[in-house]
């Protein structure tokens, strides 16, 4: 029978087994890991308790978790609401703000600047409405007018040799287009009893009424305005045959028939009458009745020229270019320029002051209160080469 040999050390004692050493080390490691994990759990529980206590304190104090507007806007917003509801303007007098939508509160004789939230609501509605403003160049100014400098001619150039003399070349001619700002106004009214109702959203109602009035007035002026106390529209400028086009007028392409299309070639001619530098950013502008006629047109292979947008908020396209429906454009009729095509970001400029002013009048329409809202805006063609028209005539 065999026997197990135990190796000993030099002093006669038995050496420890390697397996026992490994087990002891692993036990120590697991114990340390559990202790570390327990410490982390304790810290997380303490942190959660502190967050819960802070949340309860915030609820008890009645404070919102997050501020809905900048602190600088709160005093003016509260003071403006008090002025609109009751005519109390003590808090607005002398109140000075520095912000994107307003600079300072003006004297009560001329009204007060609206709070930034209402002003932004009006601006967003004006930008989103079906108006040339959507595709035009919109600038904010602090002056009474806005000047656009246009280089209407090209610089002369020529080839030269090493020993030949240099000839003088032509110089560019720069024109100045001045766009004056005009006062746009709206006059909504509400009963004092309704204003006294705290549940009535006075800011939302006022912003909606003002924005609707301003949007319709602007859209009409940007198309047909005569420039007298209002912006000058694109169709108020002289139009000439595109073959004899000159500056200060808009070139047109004739359809070849009085008050009708001969075929779809007129639309193709209109697109390519525009210079290549503008064509990439081109947009068609027409009203709904004209769009109803155009969207039924097909090419020689029976394919529709009109295609609806595939994504939300994407405009319809005609010959690959976006279409803006502006109801103030004229209907198809003999001699009417019912369709415009161009790069309106280059061709038409809208200049406006960023502030919106409200004057409260509780006397003129008792028992109602009138709110006289004013805004300064101007517009005009800034590049006559960037817009072309389609005229429904023989020539």
Image (cartoon, rainbow, N blue to C red):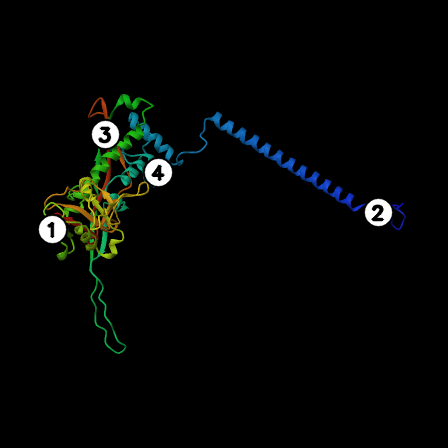
Residue 256: numbered disc: 1
Q: Earlier in the sequence, mark 4 or mark 2?
A: 2
Q: Is the C-beta separation of discs 4 and 3 under 8 Å? A: no
Q: Position of residue 268 (x, y in %)?
A: 20, 52
Q: Earlier in the sequence, mark 2 or mark 3?
A: 2
- Cα separation, mark 2 vs mark 3, equals 101 Å
Q: Earlier in the sequence, mark 4 or mark 1?
A: 4
Which residue is under mark 4? 97
Residue occupying image coordinates x 62% and y 37%:
40
Residue 188: numbered disc: 3
**Mark 4 closeness class: few <14, some 14–19, many ≥20 residues within 10 Å:** some
Mark 4 vs mark 1: give the one in front: 1
Mark 1 vs mark 3: give the one in front: 1
Q: Is residue 113 left or right of residue 171?
A: right
Instruction: Say if 71 sits above or below 334 in the image.
Output: above
The one of 361 and 124 positioned closer to us in this rendering: 124
Residue occupying image coordinates x 67% and y 39%:
33
Which residue is under mark 2? 15
- Cα separation, mark 4 vs mark 3, equals 26 Å
Q: Is the C-beta separation of discs 4 and 1 under 8 Å? A: no
**Mark 1 closeness class: few <14, some 14–19, many ≥20 residues within 10 Å:** some
User: Quick one: which residue is furthest to the bottom in this view?
Assistant: 163
**Mark 3 closeness class: few <14, some 14–19, many ≥20 residues within 10 Å:** some
Q: Is residue 106 left or right of residue 26?
A: left
**Mark 2 closeness class: few <14, some 14–19, many ≥20 residues within 10 Å:** few
- Cα separation, mark 4 vs mark 1, equals 59 Å
């Amino acid at each position: 029978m065999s026997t197990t040999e135990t190796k000993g050390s030099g002093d006669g004692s038995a050496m420890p087994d390697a397996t026992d050493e490994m087990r002891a080390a692993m036990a120590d490691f697991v114990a340390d890991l559990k202790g570390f994990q327990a410490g982390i759990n304790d810290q997380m529980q303490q942190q959660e308790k502190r967050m819960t206590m802070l949340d309860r304190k915030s609820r008890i104090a009645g404070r919102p978790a997050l501020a809905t507007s900048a602190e600088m806007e709160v005093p003016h917003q509260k003071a403006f609401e008090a002025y609109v509801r009751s005519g109390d303007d003590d808090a607005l007098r002398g109140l000075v703000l520095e912000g994107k939508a307003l600079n300072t509160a003006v004297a009560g004789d001329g009204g007060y600047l609206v709070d930034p939230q209402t002003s932004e609501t009006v601006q967003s509605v004006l930008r989103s409405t079906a108006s040339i403003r959507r595709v035009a160049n919109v600038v904010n100014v602090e002056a009474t007018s806005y000047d656009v400098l246009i280089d209407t001619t090209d610089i002369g150039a020529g080839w030269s040799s090493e020993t030949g003399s240099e000839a003088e070349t032509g110089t560019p001619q720069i024109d100045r287009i001045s766009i004056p700002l005009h006062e746009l106004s709206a006059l909504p009214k509400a009963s004092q009893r309704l204003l006294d109702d705290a549940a009535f959203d006075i800011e939302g109602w006022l912003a909606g009424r003002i924005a609707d009035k301003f949007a319709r007035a602007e859209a009409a002026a940007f198309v047909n305005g005569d420039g007298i106390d209002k912006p000058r529209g694109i169709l108020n400028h002289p139009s000439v045959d595109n073959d004899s086009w000159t500056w200060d007028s808009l070139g047109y392409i004739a359809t070849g028939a009085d008050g009708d299309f001969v075929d779809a070639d007129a639309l193709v001619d209109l697109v390519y009458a525009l210079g290549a530098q503008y064509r990439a950013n081109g947009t068609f502008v027409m009203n709904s009745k004209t769009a109803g006629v155009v969207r039924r047109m097909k090419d020689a292979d029976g394919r529709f020229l009109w295609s609806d947008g595939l994504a939300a908020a994407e405009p319809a396209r005609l010959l690959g270019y976006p279409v803006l429906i502006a109801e103030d454009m004229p209907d198809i009729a003999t001699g009417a320029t019912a369709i415009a095509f161009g790069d309106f970001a280059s061709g038409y400029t809208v200049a406006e002051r960023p502030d919106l002013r409200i004057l409260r009048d509780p006397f003129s329409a008792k028992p109602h209160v009138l709110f006289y809202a004013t805004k300064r805006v101007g517009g005009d063609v800034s590049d006559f080469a960037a817009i072309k028209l389609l005229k429904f005539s023989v020539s």
